[in-house]
Image: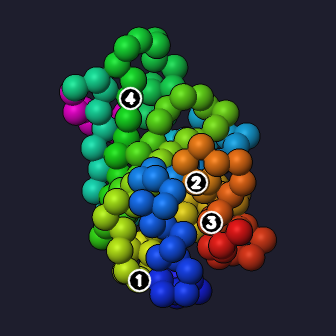
Amino acid sequence: MAELRWGDHAAWLLDPCRDGWLPDGWVADTTVADWQAVLDLVVERGWARSFVVGCFETALPRAEEVLFRPRGPAQPVLSVRPGPGVGVVFRFRSARRIDFDVDVAELDGQEGLDALCGFLAAIGRRLGRSVPTWVEGGDAPFLGYDLGADRVLVR
C-alpha cells in the first residue's frame, strides 16, 4: 500500500492531537452476510482480536448471534489489531451498517499507515464496497478505500 506516504500528508491527517483518537469508519447498506464476511476476514487474516461483551471476553460468535441478541447494558465489541500501531474497534449496532473506530494513538510511521491502508482495502475488497473514514464526529470522509480506484485515497 505504498500509494500513501507517511511524510507527504498522512502524518498530519492521522495526528490524534489534531482530530481525536478514533476516526469513524463505516460501510453502509450492509447485511448480516456482510458482517459475517468481515468476521471471517478477521479470522482468515489472523489479525489479533478480542470479542468482549460487558466485562467478559468470549469466543468470536457468528454475526447473526451478535446482531440479533437482546439489547442490554453490555454491548458487544470486537477489537482487532490488523498491524503494528493499528487498532480497530467494531460496534454491532445494526446489520445495515458496519461501524468501526480506528485508534490512531499508536499509529506512527509508514508501517502503521500501510497496515491501516491494507485493513481498509481488505474490508472493501471483501465486501465489494468503498470504505470511507471520517474525523471523529466529522461530516465528510478524509481517507478511505475507493472501490473504483481499488486503493486507499485521501479525500
Q: Amino acid at mark 1?
A: Gln
Pointers 3 and 2 in contact (C-beta within 8 Å): no
Which of the marked residues, 2 or 4, is nearer the chain's N terminus?
4
Which residue of the protein is positioned furthest toward the right in this rendering?
148
**Residue identified by numbered label 3:** 143
**Residue identified by numbered label 4:** 76
Q: Secondary structure at mark 2?
A: loop
Q: Secondary structure at mark 1?
A: helix
Q: CA distance from mark 2 to mark 1?
A: 20 Å
> Along the line of sight, which residue is nearer the eye, 70 or 63?
70
Q: Amino acid at mark 4?
A: Pro
Which of the marked residues, 1 or 3, is nearer the chain's N terminus?
1
Q: Nearer the viewer, mark 3 or mark 2?
A: 2
Residue 137, above or below 74: below
Q: CA distance from mark 3 to mark 4?
A: 26 Å
**Residue identified by numbered label 1:** 110
Check disc 2: other Cα within 10 Å, few if <14, some if 14-19, many if 20+: many
